[in-house]
Amino acid sequence: MSGTGRWEKAAEAYATGEHKAGRELELVIEYAAPTGKERVLDIGTGAGHTALALAPRVSEVVLTDPVDAMLATARRLFQTAGLWNAQFVRAGAEQLPFPKASFDIVTTRLAAHHFDDVALAMGQVARVLRPGGVFIFVDTTAPEDLESAAYQDEVELLRDPTHKRIHTERNWAAFIEQAEFRVEKSEVVLKAHDFEPWLERGGEDETTQQRVRTRFLEAPASAVRDLEIVVAEGKVKSFTDRKLVLAARR
Ligand SMILES: C[S@@+](CC[C@H](N)C(=O)[O-])C[C@H]1O[C@@H](n2cnc3c(N)ncnc32)[C@H](O)[C@@H]1O
């Protein structure tokens, strides 16, 4: 599918799909512990679900994403919700167009596996967050087993060519600590995915989707175990991955 159409379809799928909710989103609010006065930056906002959850609890949210179709969808969801304390800024995580120490809370949920340069992005978060502010990071973790980790990246990339890399819990934390953050707390939660809607959200054509289905049906035993792949009557039904939710300060 061509560039813009692909993103518009993906933006719509993000608006209504499983990103709307989840234990990991509840933990973002819990870890951020907003008092109502904060200025928040959400990086890789997609359809804006993390920012939407925070907006009624803070002073202002700034939503960033490099894809215009995502920002347009997020803007629509904010309007529908009657929330007006938001700004929408096109930007990648690696180059945030904001002054030093301009936010009290920075969040990024399920976006870092798309980043071109995670270390650079974490350095940018450290720059724009005020001293003492909190950074909430959420993303999928890779299994420690090398075979199933490689398989997970392979099928994620096939299903969505904008996928870059899923890191282990330890490696995500290392990127954050290298940006001189101190990890305060973290939790790993399970997230089950209905297979077909997950595949559809990737936005690829039917031929590619069929290749992903086939790769799931022939998954190595390590991946069937680590990703809890469920097959019934010759069809992939679901799989389950793990989301790291982490709060850090500088
Ligand atoms: C799964 S969506 C994010 C979901 C969203 N954070 C939420 O909580 O609902 C991933 C987003 O990462 C964005 N993205 C891709 N590359 C990026 C980059 N280099 N920097 C920031 N965001 C990026 C994509 O455009 C997409 O909107």
Image (spheres, helix red, strand yellow):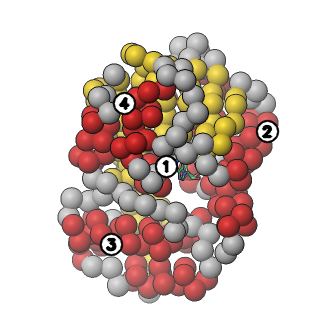
Within 10 angstroms of label 3, few (less than 14), some, or many (20 or more) residues?
A: many
Q: Read off the residue under disc 4.
A: 247
- Beta carbon of the mark 3 residue lies under 8 A of ligand 1: no
Q: Position of residue 114 (x, y in %)?
A: 47, 55
Quadrant of image for the N terminus? bottom right
Q: Read off the residue under disc 1.
A: 111
Which numbered tag is attached to residue 151? 3
Q: Read off the residue under disc 2.
A: 80
Lower position in the chain sequence, tag 3 or tag 2: 2
Within 10 angstroms of label 4, few (less than 14), some, or many (20 or more) residues?
A: many
**Gap in angstroms between the C-alphas marked 4 and 3:** 28 Å
Within 10 angstroms of label 2, few (less than 14), some, or many (20 or more) residues?
A: few
- Beta carbon of the mark 2 residue lies under 8 A of ligand 1: no
Q: Name the foreground residue: 237 vs 107.
A: 107
**Gap in angstroms between the C-alphas marked 3 and 2:** 39 Å
Lower position in the chain sequence, tag 1 or tag 2: 2
